[in-house]
Image: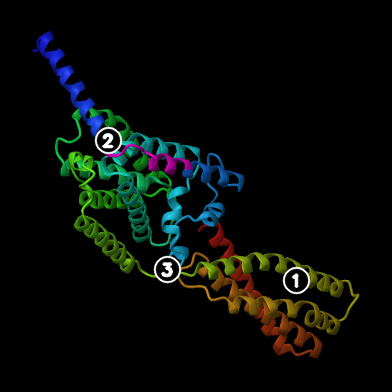
Amino acid sequence: MSGSPGQDARSAEEQAAEQGLFGYRLHSATPRVWVTHAIIAVNVIVFLAMLADGAGLMTSNTEVHLRWGANFGPLTKEGEWWRLFACTVLHFGILHLAMNMWALWSAGRLVERLYGNASFIAIYVFAGLTGSFASLLWNADRVVSAGASGAVFGVFGALGAYVLRQPGSVPRSVLKSLTGSTIAFIAYSIAIGAMVSAIDNAAHAGGFAGGFLLAWLLARPLAQSLDPRAPLTVGRTAIAVGFVVLSLGSLFMLLPPAKYSYAAQQAAITAIQQFGAEEEVLAKKAGSLIEARKAGRITDRQLGEGFEKDVVPGWNVAHARFSALKVDPGAPTADKVRALTEFVGVRREMFAEYAAGLQSGDAVRLRRAEELSARSQVMMREMRDRKANP
């Protein structure tokens, strides 16, 4: 049964008065909300700059994101720790950026006024870092991660911490107005995190936890923040700083070493690509010599000399290059490098045996060359099968 018009009017008047008092306290405590605006501006500017660098409006470009500072275990854990926060201003397409900035705009201004500009910066940065650490711990060097959502989750965590730590400080009507955007942001983030590996829910959880815990230590009544003689106490600041240092230090210690060297992995990729072109050239040279022998234009001895002069040196160079690679077992190219190194070694030995056997007429060396040829054909089929069925 609904109340009387008089009761409804009083309720509306009380609600308006409550919101008015809350708004006055908020604006008096933190007159200017500039941190939220600055964060949004930085994210948009970086996104536009990355577009100019080829990042893509709707889709991502891993190479560009890595160049700009995406969080990736083999790079971050090998000394590029700046990626832990740099990744929070990078986004995988306009929709990713728009959703994060909309959520930050919706909740960030309120949370910044509740905690003050300096504390809000600390909460946002700390949440971004704990989100990045969580991503590294969970993804085990498999994912290139970026996005502000971990830090933005920390902003929502800070709001939750304030409501719990200072019950009744934030009117229900104010919280209710944020419910829709909060649910939409969380649902979108979890859904896209499940579909797109680079936007991972581990960072969301880590950011929320970091923002909540630090904000719990920094939360204070609005009435206290109105008193210029009652700044954030030295004791509370010291506790918060100690918590941040201890937390980040513990997370750093928990990180396992990178599963592989990114530099070595890139060197392997370059070597594989280079070998593809070289193998084609060597195959043409060998093919031309064999066709000349079949046509009777050259003798067996000349064929052997041609192999020794024009073919064997190329295989020696390729084998030396692959043998020098130091690819860790956990690297994505480890199996391919191992297979190619063995294959190149067999082909090198095969042409060397053909060259020596044809020039000397040594039947034993020629039989050895035939055996190596058959073995290399099997290896080629196996590599093709692995490529077709990874």
Query: 113 or 281, which is in the foreground?
Result: 113
Any part of residue 115 in sight: yes
**Marks 1 and 3, how far apart at CA:** 37 Å
Q: Quadrant of residue 337?
A: bottom right
List the single residue furthest toward the front.
Answer: 229
Residue 50 lies, with reference to residue 321, above or below; the image says above
Query: 96 or 372, which is in the foreground?
Result: 96
Does dot 2 land on a helix, a strand or a loop?
helix
Q: Quadrant of residue 182?
A: top left
Asked whether, in this view, residue 244 is left or right of residue 14, the answer is: right
Asked whether, in this view, residue 64 is left or right of residue 82, the answer is: right
Instruction: Please say if the residues under marks 1 and 2 sit with CB atoms less than 8 Å apart.
Output: no
Disc nearer the start of the sequence (1/3):
3
2 vs 3, front mark:
2
Does dot 1 land on a helix, a strand or a loop?
helix
Query: 105 or 223, which is in the foreground?
Result: 223
Instruction: Please say if the residues under marks 2 and 3 sit with CB atoms less than 8 Å apart.
Output: no
Disc nearer the start of the sequence (1/2):
2
**Number of residue marks:** 3
Q: Which residues are magenta?
A: 28-41
Label 2: which residue? 28
**Marks 1 and 2, how far apart at CA:** 78 Å
Q: Residue at x 76, y 77 (%)?
A: 311
The secondary structure making up most of the magenta span is helix
Label 3: which residue? 258
Residue flagged by tag 2: what amino acid is it?
Answer: Ser
Does dot 3 land on a helix, a strand or a loop?
loop
The N terminus sits in image quarter: top left
Is residue 35 rendered magenta in the image? yes
